[in-house]
């Protein structure tokens, strides 16, 4: 995603709608995540966490994260 124009929130789909092992890569292509953070959240269902937390925040220029899903209830950092 391009962070040069401001903070960005990426919302993952519902875990039950994803395939077991399905992956997503989110990368700061704009290089401005230190001032315009990129926030990655679950679908909004309280039980659907990313490694036990509600969100991941990319705060470093050109940072990236690789996330996968168990196809049921959770997301994990890969």
Image (cartoon, rainbow, N blue to C red):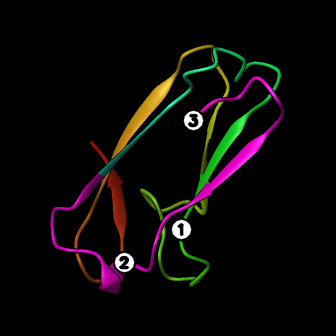
Query: Residue 45 at what x, y percent from top left?
Result: 56, 84
Residue contact at pointers 1 and 2, CB within 8 angstroms: yes
Give the main secondary structure of the magenta stretch. Answer: loop
As measured in the structure, the alpha-carbon distance from the residue carrying label 1 to the one carrying label 3 is 17 Å
Instruction: Determine the secondary structure under disc 1.
Output: loop
Which residue is painted at 36% across and 78% down in the image? 15
Query: Residue 75 at what x, y percent from top left?
Result: 36, 63
Q: Quadrant of residue 38?
A: top right
Q: Quadrant of residue 73?
A: bottom left
Which residue is painted at 60% across and 63% down in the image? 54
Query: Residue 5 at what x, y percent from top left?
Result: 82, 29
Magenta stretch? 1-23
Count of numbered labels shown in the rendering: 3
Residue position for label 2: 15
Residue contact at pointers 2 and 3, CB within 8 angstroms: no
* Foreground label between 2 and 3: 3
Residue 73 makes an appearance in the image = no
For the N terminus, give its image quadrant: top right
- The numbered mark at residue 1 is 3
- The numbered mark at residue 42 is 1
70 or 24: nearer the viewer: 24
């Amino acid at each position: 995603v391009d962070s040069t124009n401001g903070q960005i929130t990426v919302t993952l789909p519902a875990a039950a709608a994803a395939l077991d092992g399905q992956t997503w890569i989110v990368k700061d292509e704009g290089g401005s995540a230190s001032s315009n953070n990129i926030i990655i959240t679950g679908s909004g269902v309280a039980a659907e966490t990313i490694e036990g937390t509600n969100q991941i925040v990319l705060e470093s220029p050109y940072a990236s994260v690789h996330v996968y899903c168990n196809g049921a209830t959770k997301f994990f950092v890969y």
